[in-house]
Structures are given as C-alpha cells and as structure tokens.
Image: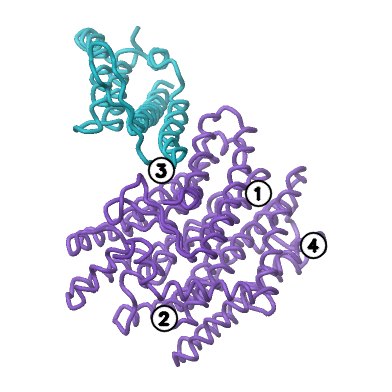
Amino acid sequence: MNSAVALQTTLPILIPLIAGALSLVVWRSRQLQRGISVLGTGALLLASIWLLLSVYDNGIQVMYAGNWPAPFGIVLVADLLSSIMVLLTGITGLATAVYSLATISKKHEHYGYYPLMHLLLAGVNGAFLTGDIFNLYVWFEVMLVASFALLILGGERAQMEGAIKYVTLNLVSSAIFLSAIGLLYGLTGTLNMADLAVKLAEHQDNPMVQVVAMLFLMAFGIKAGAFPLFFWLPASYHTPRVAVSSLFAGLLTKVGVYALFRVFTLIFPLGDSLIRDLLLAMAGATMLVGVLGAAAQFEFRRILSFHIISQIGYMLMGLALYTPLAIIGGVFYIIHHIIVKSNLFLISGLVYRLQGSYDLKQLGGVWRSHPMIAVLFLIPALSLAGLPPLSGFFGKFIVIKAGVEAQHWWLVGIALLVGLLTLYSMIKIWAEVFWKAMPEGATAPAQQRGGTGLMVLTIVALATLTVLIGVAAEPVYKLAEYTAAQLLDSQSYIQSVMGVR
Amino acid sequence: MSMPNRPDSLILRVTGHFLLPLLIMFSLFLLLRGHNEPGGGFIGGLVASAAIALHLFFTSVQSARRLIWVDPRDLIGWGLCIAIASGLFGMFSGLPFLGALWVELSVPIFGMLKVGTPLLFDIGVYLVVIGTVLNILLALAEAEDA
C-alpha cells in the first residue's frame, strides 16, 4: 500500500490526538497549550485540504490500520463525503481554537479545555473516516466523552441541568446503536461496512434487516437532533462557553447526519421502503418543530440552537428524497450549514463580550455602536434564512428543487414555510440586538480590552467563506455532485475497500 | 503517620506495606505477558493504581503523592505520547499507522526476547490508566481531607 495514502487518511485523526497528548504533557503552561491548539488545528486544516485534493484526484483512499486486511482489521476510508466533512472539521477547529484564545478563562484552561477540544476533534474525524461500524461507535463515544466534559467545564448550575439531558439521551442513543451493531454482527458475522453491504444484499427478505435499519435510524436520529428526540440539544447547547457551543453546533449533530448518509446509502440503501417514508416524515417534522421552537425563544443562543434542529431537517430531506439531485442538495447544505452555524454562535459570543448578555431584551443598539459587527451578523443570518446570493440560498434551492421533481409537495411546502420563518427569527434577532436602542437600565460591562480582534478575525474569516460558497457556488455544486454520485454508487466504495476479487 | 479521620488499623498497615511491592510487581507481570496471553496495559495499570490506592488508605495523600513521585497528570500526557509514538514507528517504516514492528533481542539468562511496538503501546496505556485513576482518587481524597 502507498504510504502517502496511509499518511493522508491517518493524519486527520493523528494530528488532534498528538496535539491533545502534547497539551496534556505541558498542562502546567497555558501559553504552550494555546500555541499547540492553534498550531495543531492549523496543521489539521492543511492535512484535511491535502486529503480532499487527493481524494478528488485519485478516488476513494483506503488505509488498513495495523496492516490487517479487510474485512478483518479496521479500515479508514476517505471518500469525498468523508473528506469534505474532515475539511469542515478542520475549518471549524481552527476557528474555535483562535476564538478560544480570546474567550476561554484561565480556570477552564486549567481544567483541561485544550486537551478535551483536541480529543473532540479526533473523535469527530475518526467517525468521519472509519469504514468499520463498530469503530464508528467507538469514535462516537470518544467524541461524546470529550463533549460531556466540555459541556460541564466550569460547573455552573445551568450547565449541569443541560448536561443531564444531553448525557441521558446520548447514552440511550449509544445503547440503541450498540444493540443494532450486535444484531447486525449476529446476522452477517462482519463489522466492516463494505463487507456488510455485500453480505446484507443476500439477506434481502429477512425482516431482521428492517429492524436493524430502524434501530440505526433511531440511534443516529437522536445524535443528529432530529424529531422526535431532539430535546437534549436546545437544553444544553446554550450553557457552555461560546467557543464550545460553536464547535458543538457546527460539528456534533452533523456527525449524526453523516452517519445517516453513510449507513442509508451504503449498508441499507433507501429504496421505496418504510424507512424512507419515515425519514421523509422525520425531515418535515424536524424542520417545522425546530423553527417553531425558535420563534418562542428570547435567548440568543437558544434561538440558534433551535435553528440547528430545523436545518438538520433540510439535510435529512436531501437524504430521504434519495434522488441524485436531493443528495447533492443535502451535501451542499451540510457544507453551508456547518460554517454558518458556527459563525452565528461566535457572533453571539462577541455581542456578549460587548454588552454582557445573551437575552434579547437586555441587548440593543449594536448597529449604532458597532456597525461592522451588525454587517458581519447579517451575512450568516441571511445565509441561514436562504437569501440569494449567499450559500444558504443554493442549499435550500437544490433540496427544494429535488422535492418538486420528486413531487413531494407537502414537504416542499414545509421547506418553503420554514425558510420564511427562519427569516423571521433572524430579523427578530436583528431588530432586538442590533436595531432597537439599548434598553434603559442595561449597562454595558466595563470594556474588557484585548482579544476582540481575534474574535472579529475568526468571524470575518467564516463570513468570507459563506460569501465565497455563495458566489462560487458552481465549483461547490460540482464537488457535491461528485460526492452524491460516489454515495449512490456503493459498488465503488465496496471495491475500494475489499479489493477486486 | 495516619490522618485523623481515617481508621488506624494495624493489620491494614502491616499487610499494606508487604502488599505494595507485590502488587506493583504483579501489575508489571500482567503488563508484560499481555500481548499473547490475558493481561495487558489496561489491567496492569488498574492493579498498579489499586496498589497505590491501598497505600493511600493507611497513609496520607501527601505520602501517596511522594510514592509516585510524578504528578498523575504527567503520566496521562506521557502515556498518551508513548502510545501514539508506538503507532508512528510503523509509519516510518512504510507500514500504516499502528503497523507492528518486532525485534528479537538475546538477553542473558532469559534467552531470546521478542520486543515490539505493541509492547510500547501497552506501556503507554499502562501509564495513562495509572495517571487517570490516581488523578481521580487523589482529588477525591484531598476533597475529603479538606
């Protein structure tokens, strides 16, 4: 096997692992940890770009860990979807690391913020790259353990409350996931995803396969924050530090979405099955419930949390329609969403730094005092609502067009309505935080000097990416098109992993 | 020197002093036989931490800290580094990550000894487990004494 391939596919997991281990070694020094975090995530971003370019040129890359041949050992498989997700992790990771420099307190750093952040990134990338269903479970757990700790770091009461819901529902989901893996292993005797796809094709008529597929749908549905089991998300995402919220908002639920895309294209291809109808209904309900939940909220980050849910609905809609165009839309939507959503959380943190609150009623007048920040908010906010020419418009447009072609009129109707309600939500934030005058009695905290520069820098960088994806939608669309083609052609994945026999 | 809020038991103290080196040796034994037979870094690390925990029961937190002479947090970091490094050796020789390399050494008295990167990995795990368990135990013991 080519050693460059082995290096490429391993680096996205290895770099955060090494960075995490090194920051544990130097736990006495804040400065060194901060340096390692920026260098490590920077290196991760470069490695992920290298991986995507290579996968784009040479097709699916496979690494056999420990040199054990498939299907016996664990394989890492980088196809286009995986490498796109890894790249997005690199972008979010670097943005969070730089933003953390300005916002994470000494106390949090002392309790191991940076090692946990690296561990989270390693878990996320591991989940994106692995080609083994049990290994996927392990990476999920790595990611969850790191996220539990990040969630309660600081130990405030609200954090504990949120964490209990978060931990409970995620553990339930893990238990379901693990049982599904057990049943699948009993049925086929293998854990390698490519091998599973081959073996399950012989079990078409076995009702057990449907049961297992349903279990996977539930397990990943919870992790993705889809209807009906999404309560953990708005209960917890607004409680930790903003940098942590932003990392969670960008990446964690998307790992669930990624797993759904992977499992239901490769292992249980969605035909005209009951699962598909269920997924369609879930997509619609997720969109609607998320956006309605957001309308009732008056806390900056809670509004954003509910919008994560409704956006997940669009991605699920892309998968559930299961036409080439719909999958393209789903992939495009994920690319757009991760960057926009992380950025909105970062902006909420910047506003907090300026005015000392997340409560819309306590905020106001940012447009007068900091017009640039207001503009920076408008870019991701309008993109989220789907206004052209920003990235969100194309994502929504492709998914909805696919819905029209497949003649799922009620789903198209919901998608359009939710777009409108998202705009309403964003305008609500705009009107309350930026436009209206600063409310009487609310006093801005004494200006904390230093650091806002770094915060603005990351926000500008992410906003630029959003604009770029919108303006240069053509190449991104092409990329999503290749990705969708690759996803729908599971034979190429199977052959890359198992070799031609 | 026992802490006032811990029961002072003669039996515990005497047996503890005898058991500590035995348990540590047993943990090293488990660590070394781990690759081909039951054992390994994880279980070895747990036994070693249990030995320190026993020491903690009849002495003080300070004494337990002196006994391990490094901060448990350092053990976690270095253990992780060693475990990751064991996977990297293979990469430098053209194998994928975690690819195993073995060398045979001839050691006087013992004869031929086969050593490889999986042993290094186990040593890393051993240190991480000791570091993590003791970090938790010592923090709890300190909170109790305070």
Is residue B61 or residue A390 the one in the foreground? A390
Q: For mark 1, name the chain.
A: A
Label 3 belongs to which residue? B95
Left or right placement of residue A71 versus residue A127 in this view: left
- Looking at the colours in the rendered structure, which chain would you say is drawn in purple? A
Label 1 belongs to which residue? A99
Residue type at mark 4 is Met
- Residue A322 is marked as 2
Q: Earlier in the sequence, mark 2 or mark 4?
A: 2
Helix, strand or loop under label 2: loop
Image coords of residue A422 (percent x, y): 59, 76
Marks 1, 2 in one chain? yes
Left or right placement of residue A303 versus residue B39 in this view: right
Helix, strand or loop under label 4: helix
How packed is label 3: few (under 14 Cα within 10 Å), some, or many (20 or more)? many
Q: Label 2 to label 3, Cα distance in Å?
A: 39 Å
Q: Label 1 to label 4, Cα distance in Å?
A: 18 Å
Q: For mark 3, name the chain.
A: B
Is residue B57 or residue A409 the one in the foreground? A409
Helix, strand or loop under label 3: loop
Marks 3, 1 in one chain? no
How packed is label 4: few (under 14 Cα within 10 Å), some, or many (20 or more)? few
Chain B, chosen colour in render: cyan
